[in-house]
Amino acid sequence: MLPFLLYSNKFYCQNRANTLIFFKRSIAQAIERSCFNIMKRITPLGTADTNGTAKKISTQRLVLIALITAVTCILAPFSIPIPISPVPISLTNLVLLVSIYILGWKDAVISFLIYLLLGTAGLPVFSGFTGGLAKLAGPTGGYLVGFIFMVILAGLFVERFAGRRFLVVTGMILGTAVAYIFGTADRESRRWKERR
């Protein structure tokens, strides 16, 4: 009786493993097909001509956006905690300001939005190696949203005044100030709501 039980258990485990492998492959293929179909249908941001036809986005541009997003994901979690504030100083500002020079402001915004989506999905890419929607709802959420406007404002200055270093630095300082105004206003409004 024991050899029969061992044989039947081995047969059951082998069939179960094969079934799981089959389902994993089926699910992976279905996801791959649906992603491919979605990618065929959508037009990347800013790639439509005036007559409505879509032009192709270059591979170099996609790789640079992905590379800057990866650099942001690697460097942004490193932060310097401030004892008097719940908001640390992170390297996100530096990466975003450098990305404006490498990508241009439109692609830098796209790169940062991808970074925000990755962090919101739960990857630990925000300051202090945290992630999730709670981080956007916390005391640093306003700063993360303010960074979008920082990139836009600083990028417009970099693009408009390309040869004038003083005006470019002024634009970067103004952009950083806008990000801090957004973040501080959001944090104070949350504090005020908690007191009521």
Image (cartoon, rainbow, N blue to C red):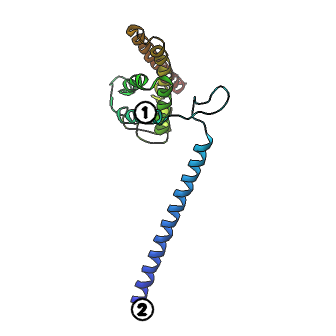
Q: Residue 186 carries which label?
A: none
Given contact means CB atoms under 8 Å apart, are the residues at marks 2 and 1 in contact?
A: no
Question: Which of pointers 2 and 1 lies earlier in the amino acid sequence?
Answer: 2
- Which residue is depicted at the point 65% across and 25% down? 50
Q: Residue 1 carries which label?
A: 2
Q: Is residue 31 above or below residue 44?
A: below
The x and y percentages for residue 75 are 35, 32
Residue occupying the far bottom of the picture: 1
Q: What residue type is labelled 1?
A: Leu
Q: In this view of the protein, which residue sits in the foreground, 47 or 136?
A: 47
Q: Where is residue 42, by image quadrant?
A: top right
Say which element carries label 2: loop
Read off the residue under disc 1.
64
- Which residue is depicted at the point 40% across and 8% down? 164
- Which residue is depicted at the point 50% across and 32% down? 113
Which corner quadrant holds the N terminus? bottom left
Q: What residue type is labelled 2?
A: Met
Which corner quadrant holds the C terminus? top right
